[in-house]
Image (cartoon, grey):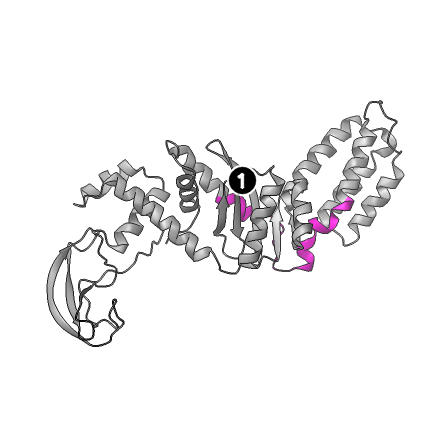
Amino acid sequence: MSIVIQLPEVKGHESNRPRQCPHCQGQTFQRWGQHRKRIKDPKLKNVRVYRYRCTSCRRTFRHYPQGVSRAQQSARMKLLAAICWALGLSYRGIEQILSAFGISLSRMSSWRDVQAAAERLRGRQQWRPARLVGVDGAWLNGQGVMVAVDLGDGQPLAIAAIDEKDAAGVLRWLRGLKQRHGIGAIVTDDLVTYRSIADKLEIGHQICYFHMRRWVSRTLHSLEERLAPEWQGLLPQIKQILEELPPNGGRQLLAFYKQVPGPLKHGQIRTAEDELRHLLVRLSENWGRYTAFFQDPGLPWTNNRTEQAIGRMKMRAKTTRGYKTRSGMLNGLLISSTNLS
């Protein structure tokens, strides 16, 4: 497998004249000299920078070539440093590798490049539309975080330092995302708080099919060993409904629920039949959320893309020595889970 990385183009000189004066927006200039500027770049050592004088305000300014600014590093160098960090190199490692190519870049400069890349990503994503969004929580570096991923391209949409169990905090966060991005539906795991949040926000909700199958399979396996013989015949029928996902699956499960004896009186030990009833009522009540992808063809039935983004975050978090600030942590997590190229 080969990886193609697209880096910004950097020109050695700019052949086009500036369009307007940065001071007064004038459009008539006189060339006012030129000089060679040394830059830190994988390909170029220096570039030619022209100086112009505005005929309107009489002030001078520099006109930099594409990919070059007042900074010593080119745009290509800045992005390359951020990509190296996202791929797993430490700041010291970036410094050592670049020194082998004759580029002297300090660890602090690499850190600033990563932070700047994260801020650019956040600004670029702030208002772009995202109709279908995967949402999940994770515990990273001793901090609970929430991750929202655009299911259209699999790229992180937002990351926030919020514990998944903080229902009020997650609701406020998702309400803001809905207003900015026009979210129409979310895909989540089977955590009960997501159901009420989706209802309050009046958006579609798909519960990840794999999450549902995982906990249902564990429950059914446990019931096979403890359930009374007269109810054992329901278990293969439940499995078949979950495999076929018929439109009336919720009603079928509710009918099974009504066949099983009612709950015991207060103080009595919970039986296998009670667990079976709880399983059936939970599945029947949320059947529309398990099968929402049938009504919305663009809605995925799993939350795999969100989990993949979180997996990349966890892998990068294990190789760091920790984050000193919350903003640094969020920027690092965003960079490590985004395709920068």
| Residue beneath disc 1 | 162
> As rendered, which of 104 and 255 lies closer to the eye?
104
Question: Left or right: where does residue 90 sit relative to residue 294?
Answer: left
Instruction: Give the residue type at disc 1.
Output: Ile
Specify start and end residues of the magenta stretch as a single range: 284-309
User: Residue 222: horizontal and vertical position, in percent?
Assistant: 73, 29
Q: Is residue 126 visible?
A: yes
Q: Is residue 302 above or below residue 69?
A: above
* Magenta stretch secondary structure, dominant: helix
Q: Is residue 303 visible?
A: no
Check the image and name the residue furthest to the front. 57
> As rendered, which of 57 and 99 lies closer to the eye?
57
Question: Left or right: where does residue 117 sit relative to residue 195?
Answer: left
Check the image and name the residue furthest to the bottom. 28
Q: Does residue 157 belong to the magenta stretch?
A: no
Q: Secondary structure at mark 1?
A: loop
Question: Left or right: where does residue 194 sit relative to residue 142?
Answer: right
In which quadrant is the C terminus drawn?
bottom left
Question: Left or right: where does residue 117 sit relative to residue 288?
Answer: left
Which residue sits at x=80%, y=53%? 248
Tell me which corner region of the image, top left, top right, bottom left or bottom right, holds residue 61: bottom left
Q: Does residue 301 belong to the magenta stretch?
A: yes
User: Residue 242: horizontal and vertical position, in percent?
Assistant: 73, 45
